[in-house]
Image (cartoon, rainbow, N blue to C red):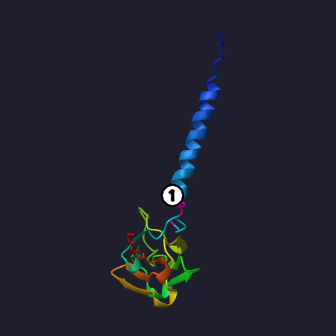
Amino acid sequence: MFFTRWSPWNDLQSEMSRLQSEVNRLFGRYGSADGKSGIPGYPPINIWEDEDQLFVEAELPGMELDDLEIYVNGGNQLSLKGERKQPGDNDGTWHRRERGYGKFARIVELPHLVDADQVNANFKHGVLTIMLPKQAASKPRKIEVKAE
């Protein structure tokens, strides 16, 4: 028979470690508590494709086109950079500030090589839509099978 001496400090240390992990995970997901952007995964995006091109939608409410930059790097990386300006009305008392502000950058690896010269983007009602035509080498080709 094997006996282990019980120590309340072991339970407390384990619980404190778990709590620290949860706090780190929470702030890693939602950014810092000062309201500034720096949030991983911002802006939120959707990516889908049809036979000829990829589509990317990004939610950017309150952004101006002048504050946004879009790049295609290496044929399969999309880079979104920008800055959401801090609200100008600072005279009042804030009760809640959940919308972040500040500079952001997001690089997304695309599932196919795209033709960077043919990329189109439009911005309507705070949603950025980017159309990225696939390179010919990335498009599926039908192979005919011959019977012998």
Q: Position of residue 118 (x, y in %)?
A: 46, 89
* Looking at the image, residue 39 lies above or below residue 78: above
Residue at left offset 57%, top offset 35%: 15
The amino acid type found where label 1 is placed reads Arg
Outermost residue on the top side: it is 1
- Mark yes or no: residue 135 visible: no
Outermost residue on the left side: it is 125
Q: Using the image as rendered, state which of residue 110 and residue 29 is in the foreground.
A: 110
Residue at left offset 53%, top offset 71%: 109
146 in magenta: no
The quadrant of the rendering that contains the N terminus is top right
Write the start and end of the magenta stretch as one range: 30-35
* Looking at the image, residue 88 lies above or below residue 20: below
Q: Position of residue 108 (x, y in %)?
A: 52, 71
Residue at left offset 53%, top offset 76%: 76
The residue tagged with tag 1: helix, strand or loop?
A: helix
Label 1, on which residue? 29
Q: Using the image as rendered, state which of residue 141 and residue 75 is in the foreground.
A: 141
